[in-house]
Amino acid sequence: MVFSSLFFLYCFMPLCLLTYAIVKPVKAKNWVLLIFSLFFYAWGEPAWVILMILTGLFVYWSGLRIDRYRGQAKSRLYLVLAIIGTLSSLAIFKYSGFFVENLNLVTGLQLAVPRFNLPIGISFYTFQTLTYAIDLYRGKCKVQRSPVNFLLYEALFPQLIAGPIVRYADVADQIDNRKVTSEGFIKGISRFSIGLGKKVLVANYAGELAAQTIGGSLDKLGIVDGWIGLLAFTLQIYFDFSGYSDMAIGLGHMFGFDFKENFNYPYISRSVTDFWRRWHISLSTFFRDYVYIPMGGNRRRQIFNLFVVWGLTGLWHGASWNFILWGLYYFVLLILEKKILLSLFDRLPRFIGHLYTLLAVMIGWVFFYFTDLASIGQMLRLLFGFARQPAFKLQGDYLLLGNLPFLFFAAVAATPLMAGGLRSCRRRLLSRNRHPFVTAADMSRNLILLFACTATLVASTYNPFLYFRF
């Protein structure tokens, strides 16, 4: 089940909110959320929900023993068991086929290649349970003694399949004690509606444009066609993923949770370093705090530490060489920035840093989009004019002119300009005591977005979810 489906919008979510509002004690509310979360996951993955429950119970059991033997060698032993137990399921179900295939290729063996349907969201809930075990061992959070509450933390449906990666220490108090306010609920509705609009109205259209161009035969594209398709995917992946994060944060507000931001207008960055402070913040901070810093961070072997982190970042996104190359591509860029480029950009006009970063990120999306190395090479040759293709080939210049208004709107919406302007108008109206007008405007916007998204979902069957693979 996905947020941008008619069943979720008009059946699952209303029923869940109604049931949640009827029950009063927090313990009962936790049971409601857990039951609905397990149903939400089982809707698309009826078999793998057992794996998720077993993973959660194993880490919960390990946590009890980490706390019980605190200060003793046994505490570290149970931490290691928790890490091995969670990562082993990830290794088996997500990476075993990839490693066996490459082992056969290198050694000439003919081992049977394991084939699994990847459990949805396994990378997200695995990392979340890991943060609990590690933070508990470090003394940064208290042990959770209720298995129901711990499973709720692991399976909470708003952030289960697409993040943000929520750390237990950030929501521990909210699990045991939270309150839904009218202000928070309204705020959640607005945030959810905006995220839904980003996903259905912008990301889906951009995805169709990308599929029509770079999703087909690259031989049929001209140079400009290729750049249009790449720009469309650049917009699609941002609005798809940030839209889901917005919906998750909005749903969290509706249930009394406060999840941290996951995106901060990454396409306005002046460097790749800045880009990764703004893109998928929960993932980059996870690798920083749980891999990079424990390995030594900037203090020793910095280049090696960055190599490991970005190799793992690529591998986290998928068991394929293109994702590993994507991660190592950013490793090279970040090293160049640390050693040369950042100091150079400080002396140059700001727009040069913006153009460099946008170009670097778009080239990076080539490695992300195409899963085979031959297509990556062909796409790069096309973009830079080495494929001997004309400027326009697919539909002539109509492909550019026909989609120019959409591309312009989406590009502006990916910056703070539109949201900042709306916030400024809102503050002015509130300062003049126009609260009823602001409330009416917010409600109207939410209803218009819901109506437009509903109409789009009814009329179209194209509603992909890019992060299912993770």
Image (tube, helix red, strand yellow):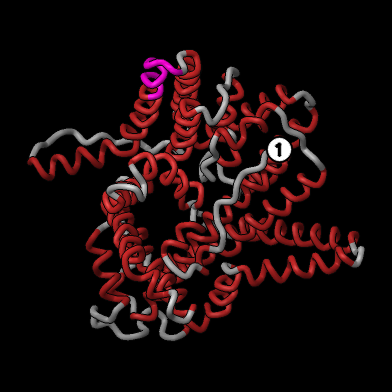
Left or right of 463 on screen, residue 112: left
Which residue occupies the foreground of this view, 218 or 416?
416
Quadrant of image for the N terminus: top right
Which residue occupies the foreground of this view, 10 or 196?
196
As for residue 243 lying within the magenta part, the answer is no
Circle 1 residue? 255
Quadrant of image for the C terminus: top left
Compared to residue 63, the image places residue 38 above or below, namely below
Compared to residue 111, the image places residue 262 above or below, namely below
Compared to residue 230, the image places residue 241 above or below, namely above
Q: Residue at x 34, y 64 (%)?
A: 366
Q: Which residues are magenta?
A: 71-79
Mark yes or no: residue 451 visible. yes
Left or right of 364 on screen, residue 376: left
- Give percent across and percent down for residue 404: 53, 80
Amino acid type for the residue under numbered disc 1: Phe
Mark yes or no: residue 470 visible. no
Farthest-out residue, left: 108
Which residue occupies the foreground of this view, 102 or 336?
336
Q: Quadrant of residue 36?
A: top right
Q: Main secondary structure of the magenta part?
A: helix
Which residue occupies the foreground of this view, 192 or 454?
192
Q: Residue at x 41, y 85 (%)?
A: 396
